[in-house]
Image: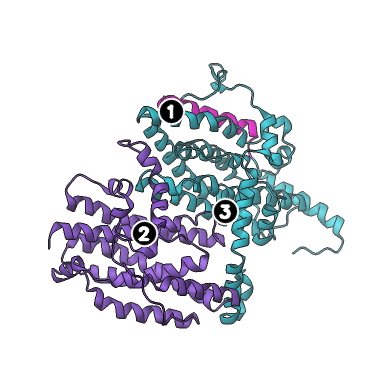
Chain colours: A purple, B cyan
Amino acid sequence: MSNDDLFEYLLRLGDDRLVLGHRLSEWCGHGPILEEDIALANIALDLIGQATLYLHFAGEVEGKGRNEDALAYFREEVEFRNLKMVELPIGDFAFTIVRQLLFDAFSFLQMQELQKSANSELAGIASKGYKEVRYHLRHSSEWLQRLGDGTEESHDRAQKAVDDLWRYTREMFAADEVEERLHAAGIAPDLRMLEPQWRTMVADVMQRSTLSIPSDVPPLEQDERGRHTEYLGHMLSEMQIVARSHPGAEW
Amino acid sequence: MQQDAPKAVDDAALNARFEARIEAGETIEPKDWMPERYRTQLIRMMSQHAHSEIVGMLPEGNWITRAPSLKRKMSLIAKVQDEAGHGLYIYCGTETLGVDRAELVDQLLTGKAKYSSIFNYPTLSWADMGVIGWFVDGAAIVNQTVLAKASYGPYARAMIRICKEENFHKKQGYEIMATLANGTPAQKAMAQDAVNRWWWPSLMMLGPSDANSPNTAELIKWRVKRKTNDELRQRFIDLTVPQAQAVDLTLPDPDLKYNEETGHWEHGPIDWDEFWAVVKGNGPCNRERLQARRDAHEKGAWVREAAAAYAAKHQPASASNAA
């Protein structure tokens, strides 16, 4: 295990949460009900807070003087290591909730395991995140049940979101050499062990939501970390514009 | 509620007792008798306040996706989230007067209810996030600190809680401005430009001058308001001028001068034509703000219906609450 592996892994953890938190924050002021403006903003805050910790640690591990802001605001899209699923535009409320559920279940299992990581700093960050993600998972599960088992329209929208998002889910468990070396060193969980647990959790919520998991959706090609959709570049150009217009400035 | 039998006689007696309670500085609670006019004035003021919190999420929300550091991004999300919380809290307070939130929201969306005119101005740079905290939350605190002593209990209690958070927002906004003012020349110019654009609208935000404020006398008599708009404005100016001096930013009023005798800062003439034009719907962003609220409401309709349908299926007793 090298520092390069750990740096890469911390970018994955940080970027997933930064990009998803940014997407969620786009709802702020535009939610379907005031209570959800508050809840989604809360979850966005948790995710960006977690991202800040992972990226800060990543900067330390890299040892080139980059802090969390340098990593968030001064990397190009090809240098981001997030899952493609989290960078997709927010869509309608059903799309947002389904994506949250798929990610929350993954993050829940990931954090649960990472708390036992041989890297104590990583374990500490994960343990803080674990407490938050339990609430996120409850929020997305409860909403998915309301949408799936609500009206015909909400059911159809939720099912469409599941169908649209399902092909992005394999990427979460696409273990490459980095993850395997980190697992062997006791630092990262075994993704192959998490996948069946994730499937069980998600299937249970889907069933309670009267929604079905599509069986005939082929997963995407090129689903390794660092490959992106065309959406990320646009998101980053907005996110980074002020910081990049004033290089070296303090905020 | 109250009986309506020999109504006129009862009302006179109740009214006298109500006035006496106000006079004695007592707090009026939801179940207490109150004149209909007191109730409607409070609904108007409180719902206007709640709407302002909700519409006020939009100009600041405009910069969440562009905040220049992760720390700033998080504090801005948290601030806008607090505003949603304030809106919710004041809507609940207003409901104690016998009107429900759906009706109040409808009044906002149809343009029947007003909200603070300040939110009809655009946010054009990151510095606007600082100046809004400093000026707009600063002015709101001046107003709300006094409202925290209002005669209606639920409103007064809401104000106490909200003021604490607004104080934090104001400090945060001022700190953004201080950072920019001490930053690069471009950052300092950005800060000064934001001050120039927001100073006068912020003064107007405290309401029309006393001579043109038809509701003030009645509201003061009932201790709903405790100070006139001009008194509040003076307090805001007196507090803000030294703060601007401390970070070397210039308030855009050539007539601003300190009066040694009164101990107050005197300001130049306010352009009330602009104020009334914005109130009547002709500010730079009136249409966009209302449209954004309508869009969110309409796009969210199927979600609210789903929540209600689900609640009806699973908890028949509380089904009516979900919409």
* Residue at 35 percent of width and 79 percent of height: A199
Please indicate, yes or no, whether residue B48 appears anywhere in the rendered image: yes
Q: Are marks 3 and 1 on the same chain?
A: yes
Answer above or below: position of B308 versus A62.
Answer: below
Q: Residue furthest front?
A: A221
Label 3: chain? B
Front-lying residue, A161 or B45: A161
Q: Kindly report the distance in space between the C-alpha atoms of the residues bearing marks 2 and 3.
A: 24 Å
* Residue at 44 percent of width and 24 percent of height: B245
Q: Name the N-terminal-most of marks 3 and 1.
A: 3
Answer above or below: position of B181 versus B129.
Answer: above
Q: Main secondary structure of the magenta part?
A: helix
Front-lying residue, B204 or B122: B122
| Residue B187, x across and y down, in percent | 39, 31
Write down the residue under mark 2.
Answer: A47
Q: Is residue B74 magenta?
A: no
Mark 3 Cα shell of 10 Å, populated few (<14), some (14-19), many (≥20) = many
Write down the residue under mark 3.
Answer: B87
- Count the labels in the image: 3
Which residues are drawn in magenta? B226-249
| Residue B194, x across and y down, in percent | 49, 32
Label 2: chain? A
Mark 3 or mark 1: which is in front?
1
Q: Kindly report the distance in space between the C-alpha atoms of the residues bearing marks 1 and 2.
A: 33 Å
Task: Report helix, strand or loop for mark 2.
Answer: helix
Q: Residue furthest top?
A: B260
Task: Report helix, strand or loop for mark 1.
Answer: helix
Label 1: chain? B
Amino acid type, label 2: Leu
Mark number displayed over residue B189? 1
